[in-house]
Amino acid sequence: MSFTIRQVDRELLARSRQTLINFIRKYGERRITKSSIQWLKTVRGSALSEDGNLILVALDGRRLIGLVAVADYGRQESIAVVHPNYRQQGVGFELVDEAVHQLDRVYARVAMDNIPSLAMCLKAGFVAFALDKGPTGKPTLWLGKGDWKKEEVI
């Protein structure tokens, strides 16, 4: 399958913010936290040029098929959503890999009952290093990929 990955900059964020939010709401299977969506609603375009902040989209032609967004390397927020028709085809893996390539490291928090997201993270090479109570009160794993350090989170 052929798709392209594009970094969302200030200008693209201004044009596509609502599209990204709608995509998350439609295909995120109610697993993306309200705080993550709120971050995407309010993040300033200029913040995307700060260390640790990044939004990447995967496109099949002009069609949005996936996205990854991280704030503060994922310590503040991390979002990964892939269109159902494109799952199990490497889209999430490629998005995460590109995020790690650009940022050097990425952290994620995934609820223990979110098996699809945990499977994607582990397949993408994340390492689980801590168990915590997540924002919804559920047992949640901290995961890291790249040059991660437990001390940056715990």
Image (cartoon, rainbow, N blue to C red):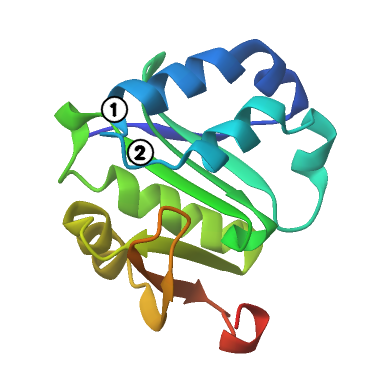
Which quarter of the image is occupied by the C terminus?
Answer: bottom right
Residue type pointed to by label 1: Tyr
User: In this rendering, is residue 111 above or below 154?
Assistant: above
Drawn side of residue 93 relative to residue 1, left or right? right
Mark number for residue 84?
none
Residue 9 at x, y percent in the picture? 71, 30
Q: Reading the chain from its start, which is encountered first: label 2 or label 1?
A: 1
Q: How many marks?
A: 2
64 and 117: which is toward the camera: 117
Residue 141 at x, y percent in the picture? 37, 72
In percent of the image, x 75 and y 40: which residue is there? 48
According to the image, label 2 marks what residue? 81
Residue 14 at x, y percent in the picture? 71, 16
Which quarter of the image is occupied by the N terminus?
Answer: top left
122 and 137: which is toward the camera: 137
User: In this rendering, is residue 24 above or below 154?
Assistant: above
Q: Quadrant of residue 120?
A: bottom left
Mark number for residue 27?
1
